[in-house]
Image: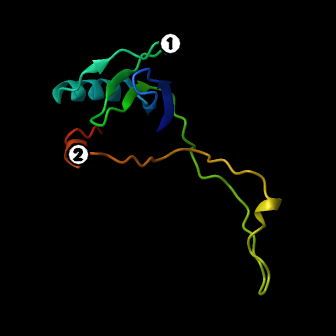
Amino acid sequence: MGTLTNGARSAKDHARSTVICRSVHSKTTSTDSRQRLQTIGIKRLDPPPGVDSNGIWFHDHDGNLVEIKVAAKSSPDEKSKFAIRVAGPGKRGAPFRSTMGRTHPRRLAHILMFTRDMSKATEAIIT
């Protein structure tokens, strides 16, 4: 489980950096991640200014700022319940958008990130 946020604007290029936070649920997993980073030669960083964190910070191969930290489980224990609408023959099965409220994702389970260098991306996979 994790979060994806926009970091502070860089004075150098005026673009927002991407911060990826991956939460792990035990100190053992955090220690394993720390050892893996050291083994593959990835430099650990201090948290960004103004961020209070006890996580492990580093840049991935594409320059994204990544944090791995121990955190409480935040994913649901079961699927959400919902009602199924059944429409008869010749009837509209989906509501009009104008009659529905705004939808919000319940959780972020996966993210898709493009990379500039697939070889580097697969060399340093941290599980």
Which residue is disc 2 drawn over?
A: 122
Q: Is residue 47 above or below residue 14?
A: above
Tell me the number on the disc at residue 83. Answer: none
Which amino acid is tagged 2? Thr
Q: Position of residue 28 (x, y in %)?
A: 33, 26
Q: Position of residue 7 (x, y in %)?
A: 48, 27
Task: Indicate the secondary structure of the residue bearing disc 2.
Answer: helix
Q: Is residue 79 above or below residue 42?
A: below
Q: Position of residue 76 (x, y in %)?
A: 57, 43
State which quarter of the image contains the C terminus. Answer: top left
Nearer to the camera, 107 or 73 = 107
Residue displayed at 78% across by 53% down: 101
Residue 76 lies left or right of residue 15; in this view the side is: right
Residue displayed at 78% across by 83% down: 88
How busy is the neighbourhood of tag 2: few (under 14 within 10 Å), some, or many (20 plus)? Answer: few
Residue 126 lies left or right of residue 98; in this view the side is: left
Q: Earlier in the sequence, mark 2 or mark 1?
A: 1
Which amino acid is tagged 1? Gly
How busy is the neighbourhood of tag 1: few (under 14 within 10 Å), some, or many (20 plus)? Answer: few
Residue 54 lies left or right of residue 80; in this view the side is: left
Task: Indicate the secondary structure of the residue bearing disc 1.
Answer: loop
Which residue is disc 1 drawn over?
A: 50
Q: Position of residue 108 (x, y in %)?
A: 53, 44
Q: For the residues marked 2 and 1, what is the alpha-carbon distance in whole angstroms? A: 32 Å
Residue displayed at 31% across by 28% down: 59
